[in-house]
Amino acid sequence: MSTSNISRKDFIKNSALGLVGFSLLPDILNAAPNFLFEGIDIKNTKNFILKNVRLETGFKYQDDEIIGTETELFTIEINHGRIKKITKNQPNSNAIDAKGMLMLPSFKDMHIHLDKTLYADKWRAVRRAGGIKGMIELEQKVLPDMLKNSTYKAEKLIELLQSHGTGFARSHVNIEPTSKLDSLKNLEKALENKKASFEAELVAFPQHGLYYTDSLPYMKEAAKMDIDFIGGLDPTNVDGSIEKTIDTTVQLALDNNKGIDIHLHESGKSGHDTIDYLIKKVNENPVLKGKTFISHSFALATLDKNNLEATAEELSNAQIGIISTIPFGKLIMPIPTLLKYNVNVMTGNDSIVDYWNTMGTGSVLQKVNLAAQLYGQTSEFGLSRMLRLATAGPIPLADNGVQQWPNIGDDADFILIDASCSAEAVSRISHVSSLVVKGNIIY
Protein backbone atom coordinates (compact mmCIF):
# COMPACT_ATOMS: atom_id res chain seq x y z
CA MET A 1 0.00 0.00 0.00
CA SER A 2 1.26 3.51 -0.80
CA THR A 3 2.30 5.53 2.26
CA SER A 4 0.17 8.39 0.99
CA ASN A 5 -2.92 6.25 1.60
CA ILE A 6 -2.08 5.25 5.16
CA SER A 7 -4.35 6.94 7.67
CA ARG A 8 -2.80 8.89 10.53
CA LYS A 9 -4.40 6.49 13.05
CA ASP A 10 -3.11 3.38 11.29
CA PHE A 11 0.33 4.87 10.84
CA ILE A 12 0.70 5.69 14.54
CA LYS A 13 -0.59 2.24 15.42
CA ASN A 14 2.09 0.60 13.29
CA SER A 15 4.94 3.00 13.95
CA ALA A 16 7.54 3.06 16.67
CA LEU A 17 6.17 6.40 17.81
CA GLY A 18 3.16 4.65 19.21
CA LEU A 19 5.35 2.14 21.06
CA VAL A 20 8.00 4.33 22.62
CA GLY A 21 7.37 5.37 26.21
CA PHE A 22 9.34 8.03 27.95
CA SER A 23 9.95 9.34 31.43
CA LEU A 24 10.32 12.92 32.55
CA LEU A 25 12.98 12.13 35.12
CA PRO A 26 15.87 10.10 33.70
CA ASP A 27 19.09 9.67 35.65
CA ILE A 28 21.13 7.84 33.08
CA LEU A 29 24.54 9.06 34.12
CA ASN A 30 24.01 8.03 37.75
CA ALA A 31 22.74 4.58 36.84
CA ALA A 32 24.71 1.36 37.28
CA PRO A 33 27.75 1.17 34.97
CA ASN A 34 27.16 -0.16 31.49
CA PHE A 35 28.19 -3.81 31.32
CA LEU A 36 30.83 -3.03 28.72
CA PHE A 37 32.68 -0.78 31.14
CA GLU A 38 31.87 -2.44 34.44
CA GLY A 39 34.75 -2.01 36.88
CA ILE A 40 36.40 0.72 34.78
CA ASP A 41 36.73 4.30 36.04
CA ILE A 42 35.29 5.78 32.85
CA LYS A 43 35.69 9.38 34.04
CA ASN A 44 39.45 8.96 34.01
CA THR A 45 39.67 6.88 30.83
CA LYS A 46 40.87 9.08 27.97
CA ASN A 47 43.00 6.57 26.07
CA PHE A 48 41.78 3.01 25.71
CA ILE A 49 41.55 -0.02 23.45
CA LEU A 50 38.37 -1.85 22.45
CA LYS A 51 38.36 -5.42 21.20
CA ASN A 52 35.56 -7.43 19.58
CA VAL A 53 34.18 -4.30 17.91
CA ARG A 54 31.83 -5.08 15.02
CA LEU A 55 32.32 -2.94 11.90
CA GLU A 56 30.50 -3.09 8.58
CA THR A 57 32.83 -4.11 5.74
CA GLY A 58 30.56 -4.46 2.69
CA PHE A 59 27.24 -5.65 1.30
CA LYS A 60 26.15 -9.22 0.57
CA TYR A 61 24.77 -9.70 -2.95
CA GLN A 62 22.58 -12.27 -4.64
CA ASP A 63 21.88 -11.83 -8.35
CA ASP A 64 22.91 -8.16 -8.13
CA GLU A 65 20.54 -7.57 -5.19
CA ILE A 66 21.84 -6.46 -1.80
CA ILE A 67 20.54 -9.04 0.67
CA GLY A 68 22.65 -8.31 3.73
CA THR A 69 25.63 -6.56 5.28
CA GLU A 70 29.06 -8.10 5.84
CA THR A 71 30.72 -7.37 9.19
CA GLU A 72 33.93 -8.35 10.96
CA LEU A 73 35.34 -7.91 14.45
CA PHE A 74 38.20 -5.46 14.99
CA THR A 75 40.38 -4.02 17.73
CA ILE A 76 40.31 -0.22 17.89
CA GLU A 77 42.66 2.05 19.81
CA ILE A 78 41.51 5.49 20.99
CA ASN A 79 44.12 8.11 21.84
CA HIS A 80 43.68 11.81 22.68
CA GLY A 81 40.11 11.89 21.43
CA ARG A 82 40.82 10.28 18.05
CA ILE A 83 40.86 6.85 16.50
CA LYS A 84 44.56 5.91 16.48
CA LYS A 85 44.49 2.33 15.18
CA ILE A 86 42.04 -0.09 13.56
CA THR A 87 43.53 -3.57 13.48
CA LYS A 88 42.56 -7.18 13.03
CA ASN A 89 40.70 -8.32 16.12
CA GLN A 90 42.83 -9.43 19.07
CA PRO A 91 40.29 -11.26 21.23
CA ASN A 92 42.83 -12.30 23.87
CA SER A 93 44.33 -8.84 24.35
CA ASN A 94 44.05 -6.82 27.54
CA ALA A 95 41.40 -4.45 26.21
CA ILE A 96 37.81 -3.42 26.91
CA ASP A 97 35.53 -6.08 25.48
CA ALA A 98 32.86 -4.60 23.16
CA LYS A 99 31.28 -8.08 23.06
CA GLY A 100 30.49 -7.90 19.35
CA MET A 101 28.50 -4.68 19.57
CA LEU A 102 28.21 -2.71 16.32
CA MET A 103 30.12 0.57 16.19
CA LEU A 104 28.32 3.42 14.43
CA PRO A 105 28.93 7.18 14.29
CA SER A 106 27.37 8.89 17.30
CA PHE A 107 24.06 10.61 16.60
CA LYS A 108 23.39 14.32 16.11
CA ASP A 109 20.14 16.08 16.97
CA MET A 110 20.11 18.94 14.49
CA HIS A 111 16.97 20.74 15.64
CA ILE A 112 16.07 21.03 19.29
CA HIS A 113 15.23 23.71 21.87
CA LEU A 114 17.38 22.94 24.91
CA ASP A 115 16.80 26.35 26.44
CA LYS A 116 13.09 26.28 27.28
CA THR A 117 12.13 22.70 27.95
CA LEU A 118 9.64 21.40 30.50
CA TYR A 119 11.60 18.16 30.67
CA ALA A 120 12.41 17.10 34.25
CA ASP A 121 9.47 19.23 35.36
CA LYS A 122 5.74 18.63 35.74
CA TRP A 123 3.89 17.06 32.81
CA ARG A 124 1.87 19.48 30.74
CA ALA A 125 0.05 18.66 27.52
CA VAL A 126 -0.20 21.28 24.77
CA ARG A 127 -3.10 23.71 25.15
CA ARG A 128 -4.68 25.77 22.43
CA ALA A 129 -3.39 29.34 22.43
CA GLY A 130 -4.78 30.90 19.25
CA GLY A 131 -2.19 30.14 16.59
CA ILE A 132 1.43 31.18 16.50
CA LYS A 133 0.79 34.69 17.81
CA GLY A 134 -1.26 33.25 20.64
CA MET A 135 1.68 30.98 21.49
CA ILE A 136 3.99 33.99 21.47
CA GLU A 137 1.69 35.73 23.94
CA LEU A 138 1.70 32.61 26.13
CA GLU A 139 5.48 32.43 26.10
CA GLN A 140 5.75 36.04 27.12
CA LYS A 141 3.81 35.11 30.27
CA VAL A 142 5.57 31.84 31.17
CA LEU A 143 9.21 32.45 30.19
CA PRO A 144 10.21 34.42 33.33
CA ASP A 145 9.23 31.46 35.49
CA MET A 146 10.75 28.89 33.11
CA LEU A 147 14.09 30.68 33.19
CA LYS A 148 14.41 30.15 36.94
CA ASN A 149 15.60 26.56 36.49
CA SER A 150 16.25 26.35 32.75
CA THR A 151 19.93 25.45 33.22
CA TYR A 152 19.03 22.37 35.28
CA LYS A 153 16.33 21.26 32.85
CA ALA A 154 18.66 21.71 29.88
CA GLU A 155 21.22 19.47 31.56
CA LYS A 156 18.61 16.76 32.18
CA LEU A 157 17.44 17.00 28.58
CA ILE A 158 21.03 16.63 27.38
CA GLU A 159 21.26 13.46 29.48
CA LEU A 160 18.16 12.11 27.78
CA LEU A 161 19.70 12.74 24.36
CA GLN A 162 22.91 11.05 25.47
CA SER A 163 21.00 7.99 26.65
CA HIS A 164 19.84 7.54 23.04
CA GLY A 165 23.35 7.87 21.58
CA THR A 166 23.40 11.60 20.77
CA GLY A 167 26.58 13.49 21.56
CA PHE A 168 25.91 16.65 19.53
CA ALA A 169 22.97 18.99 19.02
CA ARG A 170 22.06 22.16 17.22
CA SER A 171 19.91 24.10 19.66
CA HIS A 172 17.76 27.11 18.89
CA VAL A 173 17.80 29.65 21.71
CA ASN A 174 15.11 32.25 22.37
CA ILE A 175 16.29 35.81 21.78
CA GLU A 176 13.41 38.25 22.33
CA PRO A 177 12.36 41.13 24.62
CA THR A 178 10.95 38.87 27.35
CA SER A 179 13.98 36.71 28.10
CA LYS A 180 16.42 39.08 26.38
CA LEU A 181 19.75 37.17 26.48
CA ASP A 182 19.00 35.23 29.68
CA SER A 183 17.86 32.08 27.87
CA LEU A 184 21.18 32.00 26.00
CA LYS A 185 23.24 32.65 29.13
CA ASN A 186 21.45 29.91 31.09
CA LEU A 187 21.94 27.38 28.31
CA GLU A 188 25.61 28.30 28.02
CA LYS A 189 26.00 27.36 31.70
CA ALA A 190 24.45 23.96 31.04
CA LEU A 191 26.70 23.37 28.04
CA GLU A 192 29.76 24.39 30.05
CA ASN A 193 28.80 21.86 32.72
CA LYS A 194 28.45 19.17 30.04
CA LYS A 195 31.37 20.19 27.81
CA ALA A 196 33.33 16.96 28.36
CA SER A 197 30.42 14.79 27.27
CA PHE A 198 28.31 16.82 24.86
CA GLU A 199 28.86 19.29 22.03
CA ALA A 200 26.47 21.84 20.59
CA GLU A 201 26.09 24.68 18.14
CA LEU A 202 23.61 27.46 18.83
CA VAL A 203 21.05 29.36 16.78
CA ALA A 204 19.97 32.82 17.96
CA PHE A 205 16.23 32.42 17.45
CA PRO A 206 13.76 35.38 17.46
CA GLN A 207 10.86 33.17 18.57
CA HIS A 208 8.56 36.15 19.01
CA GLY A 209 9.29 37.59 15.58
CA LEU A 210 12.12 39.81 14.48
CA TYR A 211 9.80 42.81 14.05
CA TYR A 212 6.50 41.59 15.55
CA THR A 213 8.23 42.22 18.86
CA ASP A 214 11.27 44.44 19.13
CA SER A 215 13.75 41.56 18.98
CA LEU A 216 16.27 43.06 16.57
CA PRO A 217 18.39 44.90 19.20
CA TYR A 218 18.79 41.66 21.16
CA MET A 219 19.51 39.66 17.99
CA LYS A 220 22.27 42.12 17.08
CA GLU A 221 23.79 41.65 20.52
CA ALA A 222 23.48 37.85 20.41
CA ALA A 223 25.04 37.79 16.93
CA LYS A 224 28.27 39.11 18.43
CA MET A 225 28.33 36.36 21.04
CA ASP A 226 29.38 32.71 20.82
CA ILE A 227 26.54 31.52 18.61
CA ASP A 228 26.79 29.82 15.22
CA PHE A 229 23.61 30.67 13.30
CA ILE A 230 21.11 33.48 12.91
CA GLY A 231 17.58 32.13 13.16
CA GLY A 232 14.21 33.33 11.95
CA LEU A 233 10.51 32.56 12.11
CA ASP A 234 7.70 32.57 9.49
CA PRO A 235 8.35 36.01 8.00
CA THR A 236 4.87 36.46 6.51
CA ASN A 237 2.69 35.09 9.31
CA VAL A 238 4.65 36.72 12.13
CA ASP A 239 6.48 39.78 10.76
CA GLY A 240 4.25 40.46 7.75
CA SER A 241 7.13 40.75 5.27
CA ILE A 242 9.34 38.20 3.55
CA GLU A 243 11.92 40.59 2.10
CA LYS A 244 12.37 42.82 5.14
CA THR A 245 12.78 39.89 7.53
CA ILE A 246 15.01 37.75 5.32
CA ASP A 247 17.15 40.73 4.29
CA THR A 248 17.80 41.55 7.94
CA THR A 249 18.54 37.93 8.79
CA VAL A 250 20.98 37.62 5.91
CA GLN A 251 22.71 40.87 6.81
CA LEU A 252 23.11 39.81 10.45
CA ALA A 253 24.72 36.58 9.27
CA LEU A 254 27.06 38.37 6.86
CA ASP A 255 28.07 41.07 9.33
CA ASN A 256 28.93 38.53 12.03
CA ASN A 257 30.23 35.61 9.96
CA LYS A 258 27.41 33.30 11.04
CA GLY A 259 25.26 30.76 9.27
CA ILE A 260 21.46 30.89 8.90
CA ASP A 261 18.82 28.44 10.17
CA ILE A 262 15.23 29.68 9.97
CA HIS A 263 11.97 28.08 11.10
CA LEU A 264 9.51 27.99 8.21
CA HIS A 265 6.15 26.44 9.06
CA GLU A 266 4.17 28.29 6.38
CA SER A 267 2.97 25.66 3.92
CA GLY A 268 1.22 27.76 1.24
CA LYS A 269 2.34 30.41 -1.21
CA SER A 270 4.10 32.48 1.45
CA GLY A 271 6.19 29.43 2.34
CA HIS A 272 7.08 28.81 -1.30
CA ASP A 273 7.95 32.48 -1.80
CA THR A 274 10.16 32.51 1.30
CA ILE A 275 12.13 29.50 0.03
CA ASP A 276 12.56 31.12 -3.36
CA TYR A 277 13.67 34.43 -1.85
CA LEU A 278 16.16 32.77 0.49
CA ILE A 279 17.65 30.83 -2.44
CA LYS A 280 18.01 34.14 -4.30
CA LYS A 281 19.77 35.82 -1.35
CA VAL A 282 22.18 32.93 -0.84
CA ASN A 283 23.08 32.91 -4.54
CA GLU A 284 23.76 36.65 -4.27
CA ASN A 285 26.01 35.98 -1.26
CA PRO A 286 27.91 32.75 -2.00
CA VAL A 287 29.68 32.88 1.36
CA LEU A 288 26.39 31.62 2.81
CA LYS A 289 26.40 28.46 0.68
CA GLY A 290 26.73 25.40 2.89
CA LYS A 291 25.91 27.55 5.93
CA THR A 292 22.19 28.12 5.34
CA PHE A 293 19.35 25.85 6.47
CA ILE A 294 15.58 25.85 6.52
CA SER A 295 14.01 24.03 9.44
CA HIS A 296 10.66 22.31 8.86
CA SER A 297 10.04 23.86 5.42
CA PHE A 298 6.55 22.37 5.25
CA ALA A 299 5.90 24.25 2.00
CA LEU A 300 8.00 21.66 0.17
CA ALA A 301 5.37 19.05 0.98
CA THR A 302 2.70 21.03 -0.88
CA LEU A 303 4.54 21.46 -4.18
CA ASP A 304 3.56 19.41 -7.22
CA LYS A 305 6.17 16.99 -8.60
CA ASN A 306 7.63 19.31 -11.24
CA ASN A 307 7.93 22.33 -8.95
CA LEU A 308 9.31 20.17 -6.16
CA GLU A 309 12.06 18.75 -8.35
CA ALA A 310 12.96 22.20 -9.64
CA THR A 311 13.08 23.62 -6.11
CA ALA A 312 15.12 20.66 -4.84
CA GLU A 313 17.67 21.26 -7.60
CA GLU A 314 17.83 24.98 -6.74
CA LEU A 315 18.30 24.18 -3.03
CA SER A 316 21.09 21.78 -3.92
CA ASN A 317 22.84 24.30 -6.18
CA ALA A 318 22.62 26.96 -3.45
CA GLN A 319 23.80 24.38 -0.88
CA ILE A 320 20.84 25.15 1.37
CA GLY A 321 20.09 22.30 3.76
CA ILE A 322 16.74 21.16 5.15
CA ILE A 323 16.30 20.22 8.79
CA SER A 324 13.14 18.12 8.95
CA THR A 325 11.48 16.80 12.08
CA ILE A 326 9.81 14.24 9.77
CA PRO A 327 6.17 15.07 10.49
CA PHE A 328 3.37 12.71 9.61
CA GLY A 329 -0.31 13.14 8.82
CA LYS A 330 -1.35 15.58 6.12
CA LEU A 331 2.16 16.75 5.27
CA ILE A 332 4.66 14.01 4.50
CA MET A 333 7.93 15.74 3.74
CA PRO A 334 9.51 14.87 0.36
CA ILE A 335 12.80 13.72 1.83
CA PRO A 336 13.51 11.09 -0.90
CA THR A 337 13.26 13.77 -3.60
CA LEU A 338 15.54 16.11 -1.64
CA LEU A 339 18.12 13.34 -1.21
CA LYS A 340 17.83 12.50 -4.92
CA TYR A 341 19.10 16.02 -5.68
CA ASN A 342 21.80 15.80 -2.97
CA VAL A 343 20.15 18.33 -0.68
CA ASN A 344 21.68 18.09 2.79
CA VAL A 345 18.82 16.72 4.93
CA MET A 346 19.13 16.25 8.70
CA THR A 347 16.69 15.66 11.53
CA GLY A 348 16.06 16.44 15.18
CA ASN A 349 13.54 16.03 17.97
CA ASP A 350 12.55 19.73 18.06
CA SER A 351 10.46 19.81 21.26
CA ILE A 352 10.73 16.94 23.70
CA VAL A 353 8.12 18.42 25.99
CA ASP A 354 7.35 22.13 26.16
CA TYR A 355 4.47 24.52 25.55
CA TRP A 356 4.62 23.89 21.79
CA ASN A 357 4.81 20.11 21.56
CA THR A 358 5.17 16.99 23.70
CA MET A 359 5.88 14.25 21.17
CA GLY A 360 9.70 14.02 21.28
CA THR A 361 11.34 10.89 22.65
CA GLY A 362 14.93 12.10 22.57
CA SER A 363 15.90 9.47 19.99
CA VAL A 364 16.88 10.55 16.49
CA LEU A 365 17.15 6.85 15.63
CA GLN A 366 13.41 6.63 16.28
CA LYS A 367 12.97 9.56 13.88
CA VAL A 368 14.91 7.64 11.24
CA ASN A 369 12.76 4.56 11.82
CA LEU A 370 9.69 6.74 11.33
CA ALA A 371 11.13 8.10 8.09
CA ALA A 372 11.92 4.61 6.84
CA GLN A 373 8.29 3.62 7.40
CA LEU A 374 6.93 6.75 5.76
CA TYR A 375 9.04 6.31 2.64
CA GLY A 376 8.81 2.55 2.34
CA GLN A 377 12.52 1.92 2.98
CA THR A 378 12.43 -1.74 3.97
CA SER A 379 15.38 -3.19 2.03
CA GLU A 380 18.84 -3.73 3.51
CA PHE A 381 20.21 -0.96 1.30
CA GLY A 382 17.36 1.49 1.88
CA LEU A 383 17.39 1.10 5.66
CA SER A 384 21.16 1.51 5.82
CA ARG A 385 21.00 4.73 3.77
CA MET A 386 18.43 6.26 6.13
CA LEU A 387 20.94 6.12 8.99
CA ARG A 388 22.54 9.31 7.61
CA LEU A 389 19.59 11.28 9.01
CA ALA A 390 20.59 10.28 12.55
CA THR A 391 24.31 10.89 12.11
CA ALA A 392 23.94 14.09 10.05
CA GLY A 393 26.13 12.56 7.38
CA PRO A 394 28.65 9.78 8.03
CA ILE A 395 27.56 6.16 7.61
CA PRO A 396 29.80 3.07 7.52
CA LEU A 397 29.35 2.00 3.90
CA ALA A 398 29.22 4.03 0.69
CA ASP A 399 26.44 3.28 -1.78
CA ASN A 400 28.77 0.88 -3.62
CA GLY A 401 29.46 -1.04 -0.41
CA VAL A 402 32.97 0.30 0.16
CA GLN A 403 33.79 0.90 3.83
CA GLN A 404 34.10 4.66 4.44
CA TRP A 405 33.84 4.90 8.24
CA PRO A 406 35.61 4.74 10.63
CA ASN A 407 39.04 5.94 9.55
CA ILE A 408 42.29 6.42 11.43
CA GLY A 409 42.45 10.03 12.59
CA ASP A 410 38.68 10.44 12.88
CA ASP A 411 37.30 12.02 16.03
CA ALA A 412 36.36 9.26 18.47
CA ASP A 413 32.64 10.07 18.35
CA PHE A 414 30.74 6.80 18.21
CA ILE A 415 28.19 4.50 19.77
CA LEU A 416 28.17 0.79 20.44
CA ILE A 417 24.74 -0.55 19.60
CA ASP A 418 23.11 -3.96 20.00
CA ALA A 419 22.58 -4.64 16.30
CA SER A 420 24.17 -6.74 13.58
CA CYS A 421 24.23 -3.89 11.03
CA SER A 422 22.94 -0.38 10.30
CA ALA A 423 19.79 -1.70 8.61
CA GLU A 424 18.80 -3.66 11.71
CA ALA A 425 19.57 -0.70 13.98
CA VAL A 426 17.19 1.51 11.97
CA SER A 427 14.47 -1.11 11.59
CA ARG A 428 14.43 -2.23 15.23
CA ILE A 429 15.49 1.05 16.91
CA SER A 430 18.18 -1.02 18.59
CA HIS A 431 19.41 -0.34 22.11
CA VAL A 432 22.44 1.94 22.38
CA SER A 433 24.82 0.37 24.88
CA SER A 434 27.55 3.00 24.99
CA LEU A 435 28.35 6.52 23.84
CA VAL A 436 31.82 7.96 23.30
CA VAL A 437 32.34 11.68 22.60
CA LYS A 438 35.79 12.96 21.60
CA GLY A 439 37.30 9.87 23.21
CA ASN A 440 35.43 10.37 26.48
CA ILE A 441 33.39 7.34 27.53
CA ILE A 442 30.05 8.85 28.54
CA TYR A 443 28.35 5.58 29.47
Image (cartoon, helix red, strand yellow):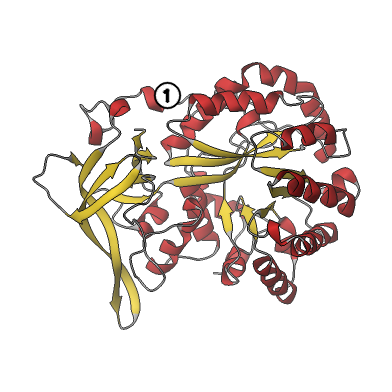
Q: Position of residue 7 (x, y in %)?
A: 62, 58
Pinpoint residue 283: horizontal percent, then vertical percent.
75, 65
For disc 1, the marked residue is 27
Q: Amino acid at mark 1?
A: Asp
Q: Residue at x 79, y 22 (%)?
A: 141
Residue 319 lies, in percent from the top left, at 65, 63
Depth order, front residue of 169/419: 169
Classify mark 1: helix, strand or loop: loop
Image quadrant holding the C terminus, namely top left
Please determine whether, in this image, residue 411 is positioned above or below residue 178: below
- View extreme (left): residue: 92
- Check the image and name the residue furthest to the right: 240
Residue 63 placement, left or right of 316: left
Q: Is residue 160 visible?
A: yes
Query: How busy is the neighbourhood of tag 1: few (under 14 within 10 Å), some, or many (20 plus)?
Result: few
Q: Is 63 drawn above or below residue 193 in the view shown?
A: below
Quadrant containing the N terminus in the rendered view: bottom right
90 relative to 118, above or below: below
Front residue of this view, candidates 296 and 125: 296
Q: Residue 328: tell me if it is visible.
A: no
